[in-house]
Amino acid sequence: PAVLVIGMFFGVPVLMALVLSLSDFDLYALGNPMYLRFVGLDNYLELLHTPLFWKSLWNTTYFVLLGMPMSITVSLGAALLLNSRAARFKGLFRTVLFAPVVTTLVAVALIWRYLFHLKYGVVNWLLNCVGIHPIDWLGDPRLAMSMIMLFAVWKNFGYNMVIFLAGLQAIPQDLYEAARIDGASKWQQFLHITLPMLGPVLMVVGIITVSGYFQLFAEPYVMTRGDPLQSTVSVLYFMFEEGFKWWNLGRASAVAFLLFLVVLG
């Protein structure tokens, strides 16, 4: 039964995306299936010759390659601090750091958008108070993706932090006691005990983070609309525009299937 349920909710949508990607499914075919035609690999060949597709793929890959290690580093650092013996008010800080995970993504993305607004943002107002010229955080192609990356790390690191905390608390304290007796420093204990023992946890967190970051959509949609100069267009954002702006649902399905293969690989 479990395999059947997984097949229904996972295999069927993937199969449907594959079938639609081999057709010219558009607004006319949506209204009348008689207009639907089989086009083979034409959608995929068109995508390979579409500069914006490659741009979106590069933007998404850049986001994943930089955002994933940043997110893991921040979440592991927070978990280590909360797990230390010297930490106080652990429950309070754990709740505060985990809070962004359970907030509505669109709502907090809008808040960030206004916080970093060029003219009316709080951040630029504070910079202006200390004599620093306002910065176009979301309007500069060199900064926009970095701001989205910063937002994504802030929004999601609490989830990874909780996983790391569970992994840290599962490490036998006898190992640390023996290391201290042998004269190992805190850094040596981290390198030779903590990291090796967290190996499986790091792998799980890495897989979750990479698969999640490849699905980047809401952040650029709310904060930048893919601008400036298409510097924040992700693969999913490109797919959304193909499907629901231009109603080229066949090509959108081809994008979805290609992204599925990338994440699966």
Image: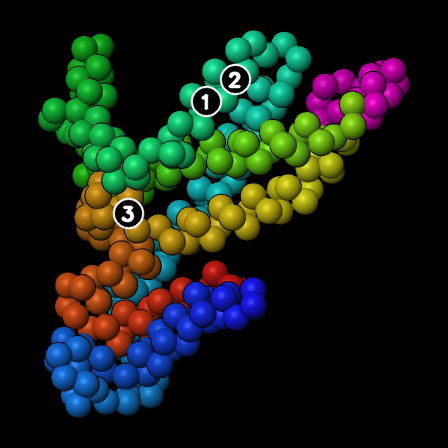
Q: Are marks 2 and 1 in contact (CB under 8 Å)?
A: yes
Q: Residue at x 46, y 22 (%)?
A: 95
In the displayed structure, 63 sits above or below 15; it is: above
Amino acid type at mark 3: Ala
Amino acid type at mark 1: Thr
Q: Is residue 138 left or right of residue 193?
A: left
Closer-to-camera residue (165/228)? 165
Decide whether the magenta segment is chiefly helix, strand or loop.
helix
Q: Is residue 49 visible?
A: no
Per the rendered image, the range of residues in magenta is 174-191
Residue labelled with disc 1: 95
Image quarter where the N terminus lies is: bottom right
Q: CA distance from mark 2 to mark 3?
A: 30 Å
Mark 1 secondary-structure assignment: helix
Q: Residue furthest front?
A: 1
Q: CA distance from mark 1 to mark 3?
A: 24 Å
In the displayed structure, 247 sits above or below 42; it is: above
Question: Residue 175's quadrant in the figure?
Answer: top right
> What label sits on residue 91 in the rendered view?
2
Q: Residue at x 31, y 79 (%)?
A: 20
Q: Is residue 63 magenta?
A: no
Question: For the residues carrying marks 2 and 3, which lies nearer the camera in this image?
Answer: 2
